[in-house]
Amino acid sequence: MYNILICDDDRDIVSALDIYLTSEGYRTIPAYDGEQALRAVEENDVHLILMDVMMPNLDGIRATARLRESCNVPIILLTAKSEDADKVLGLNIGADDYVTKPFNPMEVMARVKSQLRRYTTLGGRAEAQAAGDVLHSGGIVLDDAAKTVTVDGEPVNLTPIEFNILRLLLQHPGQVFSTAQIYEQVWNDPAYGSENTVAVHIRHIREKIEIDPSDPRYIKVVWGLGYKMEKIS
């Protein structure tokens, strides 16, 4: 059974999400501000977090940033704002996905299932065996069986989405992937309006694996086309 933390200062939203999630067999843990969410993660085995952005005491953005210091569970932001800047900010500080209020409960359920599947299997053991358990380029070593990444021997802490993007690029060195292709293969959703989402995650990966993210050695932009992993022996 998966434990899902629902954090929103609107108790009606927490209650509604609880009904939908428990009907699907999930166990829910309620929280009503960021501080409660942080305590809940410390006290429970949480597999996914639904996090509202605008909350008292500690908002969802700052709570997500603090969680990402030590926690890699998927975080889906719930936001009443529709501007791209707010979505990009959330992704920038470590969120894996977002849902804009008012939301369709079925959309939330689909995103929850997708993130849990990605978090628990990161693509599945069969795929890992087909592609090879260990992928590398230059100083990057991605061990798909152990779900670890090191750069020049130093461990790198990636979220599930970041891990899957990096693995996709490492599996196909030199191949250019458009943002739509990356989104469809990693998120398993249609790539409508995916450019900002993919770009933010690529930037976040670069900040973790590159010595100089502004002049990347590994993940290159092919202008007008997309991204590729450089072939480095």
Image: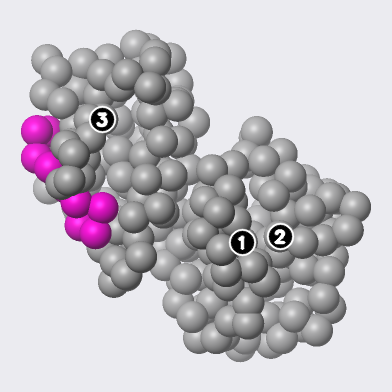
Mark 3, secondary structure of its residue = strand
The residues bearing labels 3 and 2 have C-alpha atoms spaced at a distance of: 30 Å
The residues bearing labels 2 and 1 have C-alpha atoms spaced at a distance of: 6 Å
Q: Amino acid at mark 3?
A: Ile
Label number found at residue 53: 2
Residue drawn at (38%, 22%), measured in percent from left and top? 214
- Residue occupied by mark 1: 77
> Quick check: marks 2 and 1 in contact, CB under 8 Å?
yes
Q: Earlier in the sequence, mark 3 or mark 2?
A: 2
Image coordinates for residue 133, horizontal then vertical, percent: 22, 36
- Name the colour scheme: one colour
Give the camera-side residue of 225 and 153: 225
Tell me, yes or no, whether the highlighted magenta stretch contains residue 159: no
The residues bearing labels 3 and 1 have C-alpha atoms spaced at a distance of: 27 Å
Residue drawn at (58%, 81%), measured in percent from left and top? 103
Res 64 visible: yes
- Residue occupied by mark 3: 219
Residue drawn at (41%, 44%), measured in percent from left and top? 201
| Label 2 CA crowd tier, 10 Å (few <14, some 14–19, many 20+) | many
Q: Earlier in the sequence, mark 2 or mark 1?
A: 2
Q: Which residues are magenta?
A: 173-181
Up-down: is 121 above or below 32? above
Image coordinates for residue 130, horizontal then vertical, percent: 12, 48
Residue drawn at (19%, 51%), measured in percent from left and top? 178
Q: Amino acid at mark 2?
A: Val
Up-down: is 84 above or below 136? below
Q: Is residue 52 left or right of residue 87?
A: right
Quarter holding residue 142: top left
- Quick one: quadrant of the N terminus? bottom right
